[in-house]
């Protein structure tokens, strides 16, 4: 009886062991299956998330393109505005510079005219004082008194008096014009008046050439050159003989 009981217990134990082993194997397979499923699901989720992020990036890039284009256009427009402003500033500076040059030129012209007028006034004042004190004086005598530095000793023949600078006889000479405008000033109405001084358009230079020289006051220059011969002396009148 005792032996039979022990066998029965051992059989039950072995049976339970086989049952538990089968259950363990089933549970292990189920657990492994669940673990694999969870891993695959996680991978799929990650893949889905990656695709979503990529899609969102593409959408964002597409959506932001007009904004980037607008920003680029604004930058180009700002550069154009800066270039136009720089060009406008250069034009303004050029205009101001030209205006300043024009003002300087006008000022120089004004000063030149004032200086010429001052010289004319001083010349006329001296002429009126001279002919008042010397009513019968001649033109060359006034020039010698007013501009002694322009009256030179005769160089052709010694002792023939003074030679007056030929510029006092040119067409443009203000001295000659002032003299001829005052031939009867301070003289009696019945008086003959002082001698008229004609223009000598052509005079000889040191090289024997005929030139049209500048006036002492105006400074205008007109020059003509030709070889001088004796027939250029009109009526025997030259720079020496004034009477």
Image (cartoon, rainbow, N blue to C red):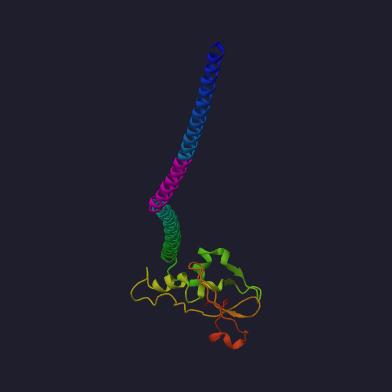
Residue placed at 50% from the left, 26% from the top? 19
Residue 13 sits above or below residue 167 on the image: above
User: Residue 196: x and y, percent?
Assistant: 44, 77
Return the residue found at the far left.
Answer: 189
Residues drawn in magenta = 43-66
User: Residue 202: x and y, percent?
Assistant: 55, 80
User: Residue 133: x and y, percent?
Assistant: 43, 64
User: Front-most of 145 and 88?
Assistant: 88
Residue 41 sits above or below residue 86 on the image: above
Residue placed at 52% from the left, 18% from the top? 8
Return the residue found at the far top.
Answer: 2
Residue 57 sits above or below residue 219 on the image: above
Return the residue found at the far front.
Answer: 1
Q: Main secondary structure of the magenta part?
A: helix
Magenta-drawn stretch contains 44: yes
In-image side of 84 versus 1 (left or right): left
User: Front-most of 61 and 184?
Assistant: 61
Residue placed at 60% from the left, 84% from the top? 226
Magenta-drawn stretch contains 197: no
User: Front-most of 139 and 202?
Assistant: 202
Where is residue 83, by image quadrant?
bottom left
Residue placed at 48% from the left, 30% from the top? 27
């Amino acid at each position: 009886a005792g032996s039979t009981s022990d066998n029965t217990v051992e059989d039950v134990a072995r049976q339970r062991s086989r049952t538990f082993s089968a259950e363990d194997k089933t549970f292990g397979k189920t657990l492994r299956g669940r673990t694999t499923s969870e891993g695959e699901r996680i991978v799929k989720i990650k893949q889905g998330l990656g695709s979503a992020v990529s899609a969102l990036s593409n959408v964002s890039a597409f959506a932001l393109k007009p904004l980037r284009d607008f920003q680029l256009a604004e930058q180009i427009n700002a550069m154009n505005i800066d270039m136009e402003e720089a060009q406008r500033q250069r034009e303004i500076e050029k205009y101001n510079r030209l205006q300043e040059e024009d003002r300087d030129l006008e000022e120089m012209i004004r000063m030149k005219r004032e200086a010429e007028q001052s010289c004319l006034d001083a010349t006329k004042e001296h002429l009126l004082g001279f002919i008042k004190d010397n009513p019968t004086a001649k033109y060359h005598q006034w020039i010698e008194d007013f501009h002694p530095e322009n009256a030179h000793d005769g160089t052709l023949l010694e002792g023939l008096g003074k030679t007056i600078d030929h510029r006092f006889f040119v067409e443009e000479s203000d001295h000659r014009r002032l003299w001829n405008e005052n031939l009867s000033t301070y003289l009696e109405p019945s008086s003959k008046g002082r001698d008229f001084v004609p223009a000598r358009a052509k005079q000889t230079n040191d090289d024997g050439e005929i030139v049209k020289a500048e006036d002492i006051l105006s400074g205008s220059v007109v020059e003509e050159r030709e070889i001088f011969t004796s027939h250029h002396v009109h009526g025997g009148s030259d720079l020496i003989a004034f009477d």
